[in-house]
Amino acid sequence: MKVTEMYTDFNNLNIYKDMVSEGLVALLIPIVSTVGLFTMIVFLRKFDNDEKMAMIAKGMMPPSKSININPANSLRWGLVAIGVGLGLLIGHFLEANLGFDDEVAYFSMIFVFGGIGLLLSYFLQMKINEKQGRKEE
């Protein structure tokens, strides 16, 4: 075996090592993030429970969690989702038919139509609040 062949084999071996390490990292990222998220949730719940137990031990009443459902949030995020969907659709049309760069077409249309959805939800909520104010009078 010549020296140049050995050098080439050594370089190929390094390439394979890089590919294996990249694959290993790609495999470990979702595993570590899932375990980390689970651990974070468990510890946050434990600290919250410890805090409530300490309040009870001191004779204090821990605050109860109340869930306020605001229909304005549903309206807002529904219109944003519709806007993002329209943005994706228009972005695809611009990229496929007019030759726009795909990143520019998609991202610009998502933000434009998502913003239009937010503005539309704002104006609709203002009208709803105005009507509710008139009904109360």
Image (spheres, helix red, strand yellow):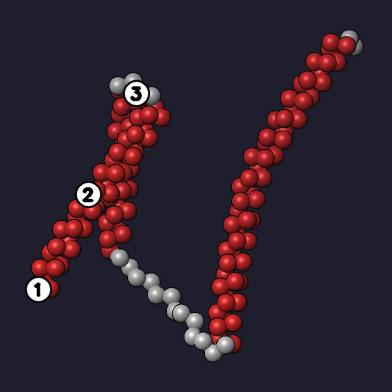
Q: Residues within 10 Å of mark 3 (few under 14, many from 20)?
A: some
Direction right: furthest residue: 1
As drawn, 33 above or below 7: below
Q: Residue at x 32, y 48 (%)?
A: 81
Label annotation for residue 120: 2
Q: Is residue 87 visible?
A: no
What distance separates the C-alpha of mark 2 from that of mark 1? 26 Å
Please state which of residues 128 and 91 is positioned toward the viewer in this rendering.
Answer: 128
Foreground label between 2 and 1:
1
Foreground label between 2 and 3:
2
Hey, what amino acid is under mark 2?
Leu
The residue tagged with tag 1: helix, strand or loop? Answer: loop
Please state which of residues 49 and 82 is positioned toward the viewer in this rendering.
Answer: 49
* Residue designated by label 3: 100
Direction bottom: furthest residue: 59
Residue 62 placed where, x, y %? 49, 82
Q: Residue at x 12, y 73 (%)?
A: 136
* Residue designated by label 1: 137
